[in-house]
Amino acid sequence: MSIHGTNRYLGGFLIGCFLIAALVGLFWTPYDPLAISLGGKLLPPGGQHWLGTDEYGRDVLSRLLLGARSSVSISLLTVTFAVFFGLILGTLSGYARGWIDRVIMLLTDTLLAFPSILLALALLSILGANMFGVILALGLAYLPTVIRVVRGAVMSLREREFIEASRLMGHPAFYIMRCHIVPNCLAPIIVIATSMFGSVLLTESALSFLGLGVPPPAPTWGNMLASARPYMDRAAWLGVFPGLCISLTLLGINLFGDYVRDRFDPRMRGL
Amino acid sequence: MLRFVFSRLLTAAPTLLLVSIAVFTLIRLVPGDPVGLMLGDNADEAAYAAMSQRLGLDQPIVVQFLTWLKAVLQGDLGNSITTGQPVLSLVLHRFAVSAQLVLIAVAIATVIAVPLGMLAAWRQNSAFDLAVITGATALMSIPTFWLGLMLLLFLGLNLGWLPVLGYVSIADDFWSGLVYLVMPVASLVLHEAGILVRMARASTLDVLRLDYVTHARAKGLSEGTVLIRHVARNAFGPTWTLLGLILGNLLGGVAVVETVFTIPGLGRLIVESIYGRDYPVLQGCLLFVATTYVIVNLIVDLCYPIFDPRVKAQ
């Protein structure tokens, strides 16, 4: 068994914990995550509040659970957005070639000239810092990568005999793309979607940390870290737990992503 | 070689033009009215019209773009709305701070990560390999801003070894500047080294399976010679490309680390300009970072034949 094979159980376990936390946060939290209690400010972990309370007396565990929910929904929607449009534009670009390809590639290359976090920042200043702004900004920032990957896969597929056979049978281009091309480039898409999920989660928490993500009082792991900064000397737990959540989730996604890549891309096995 | 350099330069020019169009368009899509913002709330219509005319906002959009591009090419990026300073000098000043942080961090990360990744690949599937790859994946999974906060907590607050807040430029006072750089550099190094180790390992594994490596071993060359003379050079190519991407990304994206350690770098400037709706500054920063990104990747491409002479032929 390769190295990534051994690590996949740990990865799967961490992702499982993350998803369960998000699911639990959807229906139940120990306390109201937004309820301010000035009497119970900055309580250390233990007793009634397992992970302590923050500067407004809000329960940290409840806020972490709610934060998991917003992280899952933002990352999933962003990846779905980027993969959906990336698949359409990449397939069109790689299969049709000609001017369609040139126009799409021109736009893709322009967007790729910006570091993705910077592009997301710039788009956020247009779209506004709210959940849909974040999803759209991140989705657009990651779109060019998907287009590139899909286009590459499609370009090599379109020269294969079975595609040519389908063309000779008189199948229309749309049918060929839908029934032959897209199903055959699912492997690279699954691989890139898995690694993108982690990268989106990281960028989203970085944006929240900078105060440009989902606005408070709604908790995200990133904005919880940002508001913990002034209290690090008195209430270190405020900074420890949200970061631990981000790191463990990312570790899970990265470990599992390696396994997914081994599975779907045999050439990369063991790398 | 000259032809290779020339053709790469030619492909960079249209990208830069597109980047400038994108930045120009992006800023015009931002909701809000720059003239109203500059004049404040109590401006009359005459002043408004005069300001629009002065800024050229009454011109057709293409004319506006060409005027702006001409100014940019002459090094005039406009003035900051909040401070009135020229944007170019502001950007260059802040860039110097970020660049010193990023260059030191990336250099250290490369020196540690590349040999480690290669050794792990050489001993593939050993306990050493498992430890390296798991460690690298773990480091890669820790966000730099959290790593920074934890370093602050332990080295700064608990142990009191390093200063917690503030920033001193290396240019002003070398030793105390260096002390202030330790934690920000460390948090960048650990994260980026994780990514680089994995890349170096993967590309080394790719090369190790090639026939010419078997051939070199069959000739009776020692493992050291095979690794250094035959494998290392070829395996460094993909890592070198990734290095360019990381460098470019960091130059625009160290905002989080700069925020943690209150360093007045370019990333902070971008975030501040978004908060303060200082559009000339934001526009200047975007243009500057994207141009730097394109240029860094161009330089990386141009250096590529040093490691892999086959590139030149293509």
Image (tube, helix red, strand yellow):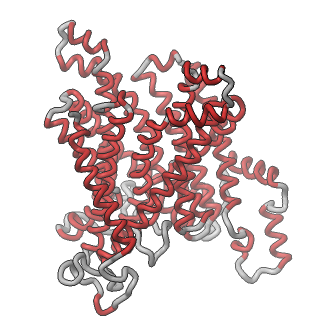
Q: Is residue B6 visible?
A: no
Residue sitting at 59 percent across and 67 percent down? A128
* As drawn, A137 above or below B69: below
Q: How many marks?
A: 0
The quadrant of the image that shows the C terminus of chain A is: top left
Residue sitting at 27 percent across and 15 percent down? B213
Instruction: Locate residue A107 relative to residue B230 in the image: left or right.
Output: right
In percent of width and height, residue B64 lies at 79, 54
Please identify the residue farthest to the top as the structure is shown.
B219
Q: Is residue B34 visible?
A: yes
* As drawn, B278 above or below A138: below
* As drawn, A2 above or below B88: above
Instruction: Locate residue B65 relative to residue B10 in the image: left or right.
Output: right
In percent of width and height, residue B184 lies at 33, 57
- Residue closest to the eye, A44 or A92: A92
In percent of width and height, residue B247 lies at 43, 43
* As drawn, A245 above or below A155: below
Please identify the residue farthest to the left as the structure is shown.
B127
Q: Quadrant of residue A66?
A: bottom left
Please identify the residue farthest to the bottom as the structure is shown.
A39
Q: Quadrant of residue A47?
A: bottom left
Residue sitting at 61 percent across and 55 percent down? B284
The quadrant of the image that shows the N terminus of chain A is: top left
Residue sitting at 63 percent across and 41 percent down? B16
In percent of width and height, residue A78 lies at 50, 55
